Image (spheres, helix red, strand yellow):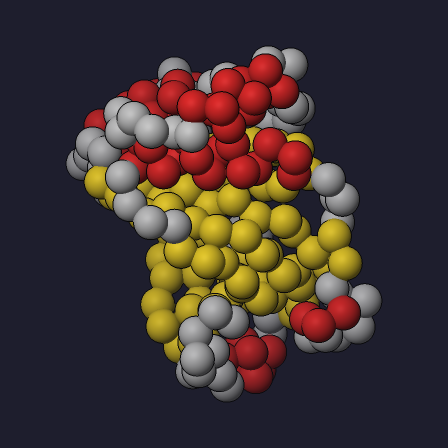
């Protein structure tokens, strides 16, 4: 399982967000360049829709592939009472032939994206990952060199943390607490819930840029 929230930020404020994250996390960022292929299952594979994402890390000297299966989100009163989305998730390293295998199993290409940006990985009540990336679409199949931005001037921010059925409430609480530090720059909410950009982002960005993010929180 994993806990996840998402938000958007104007590209002009990304540098300020990076300074803030550096101050909070106290770790160096990792560069991010990931080719993401989203596959969805054929109806004959079951009545419940599922999707598989093949992720190719293009930042590695030899590109590496990971398969990530996203299941359904947790539902019910408990899920509604927490501010993060809790969903089933399984991921594993795979070979470069994985796409051919999933096609043979009946999965079809839904869409593909190129995500370019950076990520922070750190421990703060849970093992949290923050990714900040521009999302780009391919004009031709698998043509990552010709990718163009889906939303020019806007970048996607995603906060995730692994969880289990035993500890998801604690992990969700840790993610929610962490997100409060980012509130001056962006709104973070459950995926699919659009909250737009934050009116205070410009002023907060100016303050962070002048301060230089010198204090680790």
Left or right: residue 26 versus residue 166 is: right
Q: Is residue 183 visible?
A: yes
The residue lying at 46 percent from left, 38 percent from top is: 18
Left or right: residue 16 versus residue 66 is: right
**Residue located farthest toward the front when viewing the structure as drawn:** 210
Q: 123 or 25, which lies in front?
A: 25
Q: Residue 128, position in %: x, y?
A: 31, 41
> How many callouts does the rendering have?
0
The residue lying at 55 percent from left, 24 percent from top is: 205
Q: The N terminus is located in which quarter?
A: top left
Task: Reply above or below: 46 against 168.
Answer: below
The residue lying at 50 percent from left, 19 percent from top is: 207
Q: 96 or 122, which lies in front?
A: 122
Q: The C terminus is located in which quarter?
A: top left
**Residue located farthest toward the right when viewing the structure as drawn:** 139
Task: Reply above or below: 55 against 100.
Answer: above
Q: Residue 67, position in %: x, y?
A: 44, 67
Task: Reply above or below: 110 against 97.
Answer: above
Q: Is residue 46 visible?
A: no
Left or right: residue 197 versus residue 95 is: right
The residue lying at 68 percent from left, 71 percent from top is: 144
Q: Residue 157, position in %: x, y?
A: 53, 39
Q: Which picture quadrant has residue 93?
A: bottom left
Q: 135 or 163, which lies in front?
A: 135
Task: Reply above or below: 87 against 76.
Answer: below
Q: Residue 182, position in %: x, y?
A: 44, 24
């Amino acid at each position: 399982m994993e806990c996840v929230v998402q938000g958007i930020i104007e590209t002009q404020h990304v540098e300020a967000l990076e300074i803030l994250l550096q101050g909070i996390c106290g770790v160096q960022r990792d560069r991010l360049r990931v080719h993401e292929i989203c596959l969805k299952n054929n109806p004959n594979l079951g009545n419940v829709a599922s999707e598989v994402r093949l992720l190719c890390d293009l930042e590695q000297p030899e590109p590496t592939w990971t398969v990530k299966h996203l299941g359904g989100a947790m539902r019910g009163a408990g899920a509604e009472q927490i501010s993060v989305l809790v969903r089933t998730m399984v991921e594993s390293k795979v070979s470069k032939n994985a796409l051919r295998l999933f096609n043979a199993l009946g999965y079809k290409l839904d869409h593909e994206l190129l995500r370019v940006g950076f990520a922070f990985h750190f421990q703060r009540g849970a093992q949290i990952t923050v990714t900040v990336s521009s999302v780009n679409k391919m004009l031709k199949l698998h043509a990552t060199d010709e990718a163009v931005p889906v939303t020019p001037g806007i970048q996607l921010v995603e906060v995730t943390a692994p969880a289990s059925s035993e500890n998801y409430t604690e992990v969700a609480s840790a993610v929610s607490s962490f997100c409060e530090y980012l509130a001056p720059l962006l709104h973070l909410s459950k995926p699919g819930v659009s909250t737009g950009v934050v009116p205070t982002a410009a002023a907060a960005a100016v303050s962070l840029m002048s301060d230089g993010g010198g204090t680790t929180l």
